[in-house]
Image (cartoon, grey):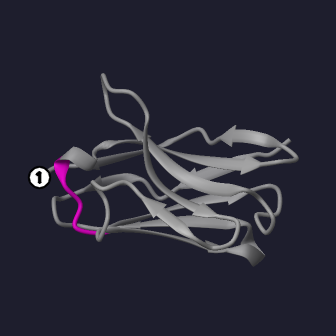
Amino acid sequence: QVQLVESGGGLVQPGGSLRLSCAASRSIFSINAMGWYRQAPGKQREFVARLLGGGFTNYADSVKGRFTISRDIAKNTVYLQMNSLKPEDTAVYFCNFDSTVYGSTWGQGTQVTVSS
């Protein structure tokens, strides 16, 4: 079993920045992937960014060049640095841990609101 604790959400003005953190209770060294998804009100959950076990990254087109996913293996933590935030980035952001051993685990979500 894996527990994920997300933090870093909040209210920010358009053009601002936030950094989300997702701390896992298990090692993230040899997992399949760890990623971020988001769900806006009335919309389906969508992919944002993913960091594969080998260190490769994938991003949704809507966040490329603005968001950066990274990890600290020693802390079992994945980060999502979000710059140049837009109102359309407003959503609940969820962390996902994908492991061959433990399967797929979701965090509880953290609210990001971009508004003036």
Regarding mark 1 in the picture, which secondary structure is present there?
Answer: loop
Magenta residues: mostly which secondary structure? loop
Residue 38 quadrant: top left
**According to the image, label 1 marks what residue?**
116
- Point out the stretch of residues depicted in magenta: 83-87
Query: In this picture, is 8 found above or below 98?
Result: below
Magenta run includes residue 108: no
Residue 112 in picture, x, y percent from top left: 35, 48
Name the amino acid type tagged 1.
Answer: Ser
User: In the image, 61: left or right of 110?
Assistant: left
Query: In this picture, is 1 found above or below 99?
Result: above
Residue 91 in picture, x, y percent from top left: 34, 40
Outermost residue toward the top in this view: 42
Asked whether 93 or 51 is in front, the reply is 51
Query: In this picture, is 97 found above or below 45?
Result: below
Magenta run includes residue 86: yes
Residue 12 in picture, x, y percent from top left: 25, 58
